[in-house]
């Protein structure tokens, strides 16, 4: 991960569009939901990963320092932004219509939801349809939790065993549950699961790849308060990074080639 990322030039037009209080402070605080590799790798107070690289690059474009703070769980992240405690989350956080009611999303990632299972997939979990009666780990408050709970109801309605939904506040705990055989699978975003599978020394594999798994097209992105001028500023900053090749360089650096988009946008989730 030692690849250098080019330093960005200050864009005075974008800086002028920042709220006055941010320009006066010369800094913003972006909140994260703990480790979400390879986007966000949190060790103590240190943040690494693609999100950190994008934060640094966008901070250079806007002429501000972007600091980082961690909270436990997506609800705490969203409430922290809406209360004004944090200016935004670089994310990426899943963009869905119900979340757009209270926040705006600046989408910079295409994502898919799949399963991480024990090597050899002994429980035969290959799709949502095969999850009935299984112990499925999910992130608390996330979109995958909602989908798997809805599917569990469908299992019961069809006379099949319900899904045992196991909710965790962070990715590492969810992966550990699968590796220690306390969960049969972890149902989550493909990008971080790919990372965790690579780090698992052959103990895990991906399953359900290439299927919708209860989701429509998935967009993920930065999160701001509803109606915040930061949305347009961040969108245009990402367009600059895509145009000058930095976006592709960062995504490839962290093995995220399959999650790139050439059309960032605001509230694209459907």
Image (cartoon, rainbow, N blue to C red):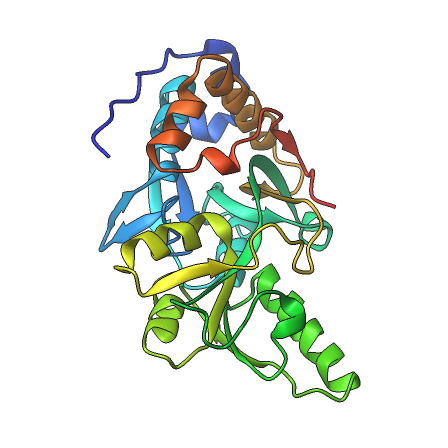
Image quarter of the N terminus: top left
Residue found at the very far right of the displayed protein:
157
Classify residue 128 by image quadrant: bottom right
Determine the residue positioned at 41% across, 42% down.
30
107, above or below 3, in the image: below
The location of residue 216, given as percent across then percent down, is 71, 50
Classify residue 44 by image quadrant: bottom left
Classify residue 181 by image quadrant: bottom left
Determine the residue positioned at 54% across, 62% down.
75
The answer to whether residue 182 is left or right of residue 93 is left
The answer to whether residue 113 is left or right of residue 36 is right
Determine the residue positioned at 49% across, 42% down.
88
The location of residue 18, given as percent across then percent down, is 51, 24
The location of residue 233, given as percent across then percent down, is 55, 24
The answer to whether residue 19 is left or right of residue 41 is right
The answer to whether residue 94 is left or right of residue 190 is right
The location of residue 198, given as percent across then percent down, is 32, 52
């Amino acid at each position: 991960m030692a690849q250098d990322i080019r330093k960005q030039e200050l864009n005075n037009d974008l800086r002028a569009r920042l709220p006055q209080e941010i320009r006066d402070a010369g800094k913003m605080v972006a909140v994260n939901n703990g480790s979400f590799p390879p986007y966000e790798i949190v060790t103590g107070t240190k943040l690494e990963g693609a999100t950190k690289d994008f934060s640094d690059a966008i901070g250079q474009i806007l002429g501000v320092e972007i600091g980082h703070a961690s909270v436990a769980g997506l609800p705490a992240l969203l409430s922290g932004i809406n209360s004004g405690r944090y200016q935004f989350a670089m994310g990426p956080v899943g963009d869905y219509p119900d979340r757009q009611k209270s926040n705006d999303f600046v989408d910079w990632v295409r994502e898919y939801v799949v399963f991480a299972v024990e090597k050899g997939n002994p429980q035969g979990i290959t799709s949502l349809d095969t999850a009935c009666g299984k112990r499925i780990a999910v992130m608390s408050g996330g979109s995958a939790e909602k989908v798997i709970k809805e599917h569990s109801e469908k299992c019961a309605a069809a006379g099949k065993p319900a899904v045992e939904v196991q909710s965790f506040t962070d990715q590492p705990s969810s992966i550990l549950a699968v590796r220690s055989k306390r969960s049969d699978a972890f149902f989550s975003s493909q990008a971080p699961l790919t990372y965790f599978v690579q780090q698992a020394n052959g103990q895990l594999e991906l399953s359900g790849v290439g299927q919708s798994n209860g989701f429509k097209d998935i967009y993920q992105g930065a999160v701001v308060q509803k109606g915040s001028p930061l949305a347009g500023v961040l969108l245009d900053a990402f367009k600059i990074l895509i145009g000058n090749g930095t976006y592709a360089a960062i995504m490839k650096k962290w093995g995220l080639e399959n999650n790139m988009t050439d059309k960032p946008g605001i509230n694209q989730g459907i």
